[in-house]
Amino acid sequence: MDWPKGIGGLCYGGDYNPEQWPEEVWEEDVALMRRAGVNLVSVGVFSWARLEPSPGSHDFAWLDRVLDLLHGAGVRVNLATPTASPPPWFGLAHPDALTVTADGTRLTHGSRDTYCVSAPAYREASVRIAGELARRYRGHPALAMWHVHNEYGTGCHCDHAAAAFRTWLRDRYGTLDALNDAWTGSFWSQHHSAWEQVMPPRATRYLPNPAQTLDFRRFLSDEMLTHFREQKAVLREHTPDVPVTTNFVFGDWVPVDHRRWAAETDLVAVDHYPTADPPQETAFAADLARGWAGGRPWLLMEQAVVTYTGHRMIAKRPGEITRLSLSHVARGSRGVMFFQWRASRGGAELWHAGMVPHAGEDSRIFREITELGALLPSLEEACRAPVEAEAAVLWDAEAGWALQAPGLPSAGLDHTEEVRRAHRVLYRGGVTADVVHPSAGLSAYRLVLVPALYLISDDDAANLRRHVEGGGTLVVTYLSGVADPCARVRTGGYPGALRDLLGVRVEEFHPLPPGAALALTGPGGEDLGTGTFWSEHVHLEGAEALARYGASVPAPGIGPHDAGWGAGAALHGLPAITRHRYGAGTALYVSTRLPDADLSRLLGLEPSPLELVRRGEWVFAVNHGDDEQQVPDGPLLPPGGYAVRRARQG
Amino acid sequence: MDWPKGIGGLCYGGDYNPEQWPEEVWEEDVALMRRAGVNLVSVGVFSWARLEPSPGSHDFAWLDRVLDLLHGAGVRVNLATPTASPPPWFGLAHPDALTVTADGTRLTHGSRDTYCVSAPAYREASVRIAGELARRYRGHPALAMWHVHNEYGTGCHCDHAAAAFRTWLRDRYGTLDALNDAWTGSFWSQHHSAWEQVMPPRATRYLPNPAQTLDFRRFLSDEMLTHFREQKAVLREHTPDVPVTTNFVFGDWVPVDHRRWAAETDLVAVDHYPTADPPQETAFAADLARGWAGGRPWLLMEQAVVTYTGHRMIAKRPGEITRLSLSHVARGSRGVMFFQWRASRGGAELWHAGMVPHAGEDSRIFREITELGALLPSLEEACRAPVEAEAAVLWDAEAGWALQAPGLPSAGLDHTEEVRRAHRVLYRGGVTADVVHPSAGLSAYRLVLVPALYLISDDDAANLRRHVEGGGTLVVTYLSGVADPCARVRTGGYPGALRDLLGVRVEEFHPLPPGAALALTGPGGEDLGTGTFWSEHVHLEGAEALARYGASVPAPGIGPHDAGWGAGAALHGLPAITRHRYGAGTALYVSTRLPDADLSRLLGLEPSPLELVRRGEWVFAVNHGDDEQQVPDGPLLPPGGYAVRRARQG
Amino acid sequence: MDWPKGIGGLCYGGDYNPEQWPEEVWEEDVALMRRAGVNLVSVGVFSWARLEPSPGSHDFAWLDRVLDLLHGAGVRVNLATPTASPPPWFGLAHPDALTVTADGTRLTHGSRDTYCVSAPAYREASVRIAGELARRYRGHPALAMWHVHNEYGTGCHCDHAAAAFRTWLRDRYGTLDALNDAWTGSFWSQHHSAWEQVMPPRATRYLPNPAQTLDFRRFLSDEMLTHFREQKAVLREHTPDVPVTTNFVFGDWVPVDHRRWAAETDLVAVDHYPTADPPQETAFAADLARGWAGGRPWLLMEQAVVTYTGHRMIAKRPGEITRLSLSHVARGSRGVMFFQWRASRGGAELWHAGMVPHAGEDSRIFREITELGALLPSLEEACRAPVEAEAAVLWDAEAGWALQAPGLPSAGLDHTEEVRRAHRVLYRGGVTADVVHPSAGLSAYRLVLVPALYLISDDDAANLRRHVEGGGTLVVTYLSGVADPCARVRTGGYPGALRDLLGVRVEEFHPLPPGAALALTGPGGEDLGTGTFWSEHVHLEGAEALARYGASVPAPGIGPHDAGWGAGAALHGLPAITRHRYGAGTALYVSTRLPDADLSRLLGLEPSPLELVRRGEWVFAVNHGDDEQQVPDGPLLPPGGYAVRRARQG
């Protein structure tokens, strides 16, 4: 496994913000880091105002002392450029570089990330401060890695953004005619006759143009990537051997295509904050990060010692910090990093927990942190082997964004959520899966799941065909293959680009009202569970029916006349799940949403709370359940127990 | 029945947007139209950017070809002026003509309807493009009708709108003193001392002025009507014999008084998209359209082949497209039109279904469209007779708008919803009702329902009195008669303008908390159901009590101390439903909201899923239920069946 | 008891807005006031536009007539300055003086309170109109009191406000260094290097700075107080003997620290509109007002004859107007005032009920008003004695504001709500409590409750320590003592400033998910109820455990794996409620939220619907329940009954 030079073994540490504390605390910090086994910290993420208190006047002395102190203690530094939060003076000097929302509100400093990534003043200032840092700390022995910016994901709708968006569109489409075609300018009189008419999706009267909205997300991703590249270039110039990364943050609101970005970083680094079901979400996030990294090692750059549910900070169970960290490492992370080292006492995130809590070292959290620090070095050998995945789940940021358009056939459509659902069924069934893009090489997988892949290019559809032709198994779920890369419907029958591969023609989509469900029955009339949320009018064109739609399932709040509405009456007896022999392989189509248990049964899986990941001759095993679990050919794990051991001869 | 010249029999077709498709598709379109029996299509609704790609430069050649092609196939054209969506160049040339929201945000093109209907530049451009179309296509043999604009309903709060609002108010009130009186300027120091102080209801600190808000809606309706009239004038000038219409869209958010507009159109045309209960909503929409049209024929200009619930596109049951279309025709529509002919593949409404779905002609939807097209010509004779209605439900846009004010005695007050409720009880009880304005002639009706008519003029109140004096029966429900046309309370006791007619004096309104209900008992103590949502402290002043308030009905979440709160204790034993002999007639007052079953019983009705509409010697019968239904003196209809037949000798 | 000169005995009346009615109604008003026993009315609250119809031109003649008429009828006048609603002409003359929201929207007149209290033009106009009134009516025999403005509570984010905020911050902190320290400028690069960079909390990208937000609320309170003081000064100049007040309105959105303001008024006056549970809310509001007034008399300046639940106007039960008014008087109000005398017929509050309803004098409401007016004079002797309170509940506006910050450990945190909860348990248990600030003298109380006092100063913490040292009992609940006055966490273990007093160290907070609960068990394993919403990891450092955390309580929607989440597993067997002997007293700590019944039991109380308030030898007793209640040593009260009588010899 390749790994950026100069970082060493498994990393352990977190964000370290000494500027928030008096210097006497720094000494204690370093002593506690030693005790906890910390070997890497991210420094300076939001330090711009401290590094450049007024325009052009710099103060690095404090940071010199911090780096020297850390170096003295054997802790290496992941040094950040502070561009995610310009100081207050910046906005006053460059009001045109502050964020403008879709409705034209110009934001004010007072939080973080209040800038326009297209504003020349911001771009210049970013490169300048990155250059100052690189010049000062090139050669510092503590410097292990560059952490550019923080959690890219911030859009703007100002005139700078509009101009840059136009440039990006010219590059993409060449001519206005091509743009008008891609955006279906013939609809609602949206034909553009000059480039200056083209705008970001600003506040407008009614439904926006879905292709424009999608392209604006693509543009924002590329525009931020340019900002990253500019910083990377100046860092590379001064420190050609120091790896450069940035910490990816993942969410529906984030207009960043991390898969494309991954190739531009020396190390894929991700932040991960699970909400409802930490073990399953952790496995998904880790498998996704590994997918972005193309199977190479990656790094968990931020997690928290507690769980944030969005509305509440929830304690982790005893040992859970270690169990979730182990899951990340098992799935390819070259270490375990937290936000943050020491919990802040002021500022907007004063209740963001830390490795050293407000209460100090005499605490359960710090004791668990110390135990985890002692465990990690023992895992390094196991981490040299690649993660073994027998299945893949396909995920594409653009398909997910396209399904965020208004005016779709149903509320609640969510590509990423369907991908999570599919991954969850595999995870609980003990199958390690890669989460990869539809363009990825698929030959290594015995099973490939394609959940609600609304938008797909012709090339990617061909990739799927090749996989099945070559003998692979593909399971495609509802609403896949429908749109082209401009988010236009492929006409002539759904699932569009995948019709021939799946051997079906879908005449119409029939979303189901909330709570409604249709029974599914097998060829012999046997009960195969239910379809929920969505149904389709499927014609067989080469495929065979594995399950057919049956009666509407009674549900509270849905009367006999409403249940399934028209769908129940229209689809009774028609195919719901189909199988198509194609080349040497098999392609299944699931035209509805199966509850987890039904999808699990379709895939022949048996759920278990025992997490197993195989890497060469090593097995990582974690028992997330409340009962003992037997590791195959291995020990009996108590509730909450784990083991990393050689399972078979290499 | 009169009917605009030159349109012919029952219309069948939909919106046709050939500009969204390559010309080779046009040929297929026309062939499919022939197959489906289409005889009228609406063309050019959003074609401005295609017709005038840049300011002053026009391109009609494509439209010439479209009209020629349609003419060749025997399809006539309802030609639209494209003013509902100015092209992108328009906003750049005239930024002052873009919409401004109440909080001052100036909207950007990128959707539709982004203009200020008071802006001179927009008004001039609208007349100009309408004139260009009229000049070009006068005399074209395909031209059957003009479709001005689309779904008027768009307000603006900019300075153009403010100036026009002031002019409108001067016309209405004459003097500032009269305006201050009408708006109760003495409240909260809102006295205006100069006209330039008068503003649209822009964002303000706290509750807005309800009279100002109501007048602004009235102004918007009139202002848009002027825009319509200006286009109509230029069309009339060039094509004096071609009827002119616009498609009404109905909703709480639409500041258009369609009843007033109806007189200005040559044909009332309506769009109708039911949501929760399509059969009942269809009957209501059709009866309302017939009311707007003053009993004359009208035209269903848009409906969809599926049902939009707001959050989901729901399939219609097999045959339901035909059943709902039949209901419209039975209730006076001179045809059946859809949005749209062919489902779009891009743009904001790419998931708006079409007569030709994405899947193409080989589909259940297109087959049902073809069957409906074959059926319609057979109905023309039945449609010559007038619809017979024995009851009327009174509805007034202004009363509904007045009940959208903040600060009313209860959340959930909704005049239109109460009218729907009353209409629904009649509809399910087999009674065909007209939905008419309180000023309408009422002598033809044996029963007139007046649901929650909050605002009423003295003249309209006198109209109701005359109806009862003359022997009619009136059923008035809670909160009626209370406000004058300036939305000021008529003091001295509710129901204000209707006190003498109803023979009651209401001392106080007692809204009920959600879930609370009060038992209703008859003179002999018999159970007469419950009153919900609202109750009143009623004194008899000439009327007799048909039902009195009894005990609070226990409900989940409402403790014994809360149930009905003060209302239960204060109203026990007082009148709830009253009857007053007035002249030769009878006026009932229902001071609470009756559940459907209780209102049905009060009116002596029996619910049935069989829809029956009589027109002269013809009867239209549609079975919306899941069981067979016997048509009186007619056939036994299977579930989903229908019949149109002579029922009695004329 | 001291009492402003010239007001006399118990006041009775309400807001009187004769400018909304023709003069013939004024005669009827005065006759009805006599009949009802009204002796004081608030006049002119929103009369600016009537008093100064255009800039600089005044019309006082109508007000002269009103005051003369009232004087003739023996009704005294609480004369208002009308500054809460500048006339429309004001905003046109001074657009810079209109409110600007956090996102930069400049509001328009059309409601009330649309001004910036920092705008020079508004400040000057306010003093001018107040001076005009004072000059004209000094010496008028009806003038009893000045009512400055109305319900202060209106913020602004404009440049005037920004400049004033900076001045206030300079006064508070002196230097930028001190400001940066107080605001934790080291977090997210928020260090300010020049004063002009300091802004109100305007719309920004993400979470705002909690210290900035808190200081902005403090600033708004002080800024409005300056506006009040300026008016008071000019009124004092002309009428040195007339008391000056303003009506406090209380709510989470109101940035006014009424306790600080109280000292600046000659009489604390409050508006009170209960919502869900009028008796309990009334007792709380009255005890809070008495706390603001430092135990001196105060005045209920506004209440309504009905209950507003936010969404509905709900009738009061027969007699409830009197019962709630009695509760206010029993708890120290020197009278009973309503909003408003006569219900308006127009304007935004046309459905705000009045002492004279829309229906007029022949109404239950007016009859009850007349009965109450007849009762009040008989209570004057009882009102001379001070209210006796044996307990205190501590409440601090600043602590409440600090808990409105985003990013706290849990949604639903609410200091005021916890104070209400504690007060409610005492109220239902028959204990009269003062609601006072943590700095108040506490020696008179046998019991002091400290609910969720998140923010506390060192001085106030010392005050609590002194109280316990001196023999008092203190009950502190969760999340208290945590933050310093800059809303920064006190590190080293919670509850921060109260650790030594409580003899505990809390290592971590463990908020519970909605619906989750942990069993509480006593030293012998006995059931002590449950802890909900919140739990903590408590270590004993001198205290003893009264209750310990037990098993998670099963709850709907929370599976066995989720119940209590990590908290249940982490806290099992650890202390939940502790007791610490400190000096001569005792300090309890409750580290979770106890349901009312469990808190009641902990305090040894027994709930009852009988409200009892003792004042010297007098007892006020009100039966709010549905059953008879026995007054100790007194009469048997029927449901809804009340008595005010001598209970013991003085």
Image (cartoon, coloured by chain):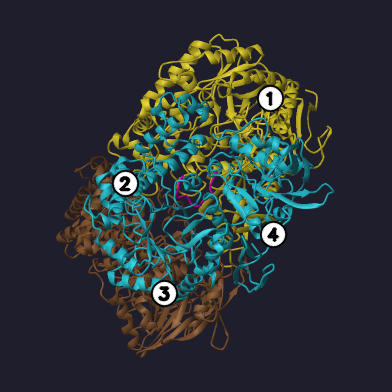
Chain colours: A cyan, B yellow, C brown
* Disc 3 to disc 2: CB gap under 8 Å: no
Give above or below for A7 relative to A486: below
Whether A216 is drawn above or below C351: the answer is: above
Tell me whether circle 2 and circle 1 mark residues in contact (CB < 8 Å): no
- CA gap between label 1 and label 4 equals 45 Å
Side of C455 relative to B577 (left or right): left
How far is mark 2 from mark 1, CA to CA? 78 Å
On the question of residue B554 being in view, the answer is: no
Mark 3 or mark 2, earlier in chain = 3
Q: Which residues are magenta?
A: B405-414
Q: Are marks 3 and 2 on the same chain?
A: yes
* Callouts 1 and 3 close, C-beta under 8 Å: no
Q: Is residue B412 magenta?
A: yes
Q: Are marks 2 and 1 on the same chain?
A: no
Residue A74, percent from left and from top: 37, 68
Distance from disc 2 to disc 4, alpha carbons, whole Å, reads 86 Å
Same subunit under labels 3 and 4? no
Q: Amino acid at mark 4?
A: Gly
Taking depth in this image into account, of A568 and A365 the one nearest to the observer is A365
Q: Which residue has dot 3 on it?
A: A35
Helix or strand or loop: what does disc 2 sit on? helix
Residue on which the image places disc 1: B386
- The image quadrant of residue B388 is top right
Question: Could you tell me the amino acid type at mark 1?
Answer: Pro
Q: Which residue is mark 2?
A: A127
Residue drawn 62% across the image and 71% down it: C554
Instruction: Compare residues A449 and B447 and report the one nearer the observer.
Output: A449
Residue A227 seen in the figure: yes
User: Which circle marks residue B525 in the picture?
Assistant: 4
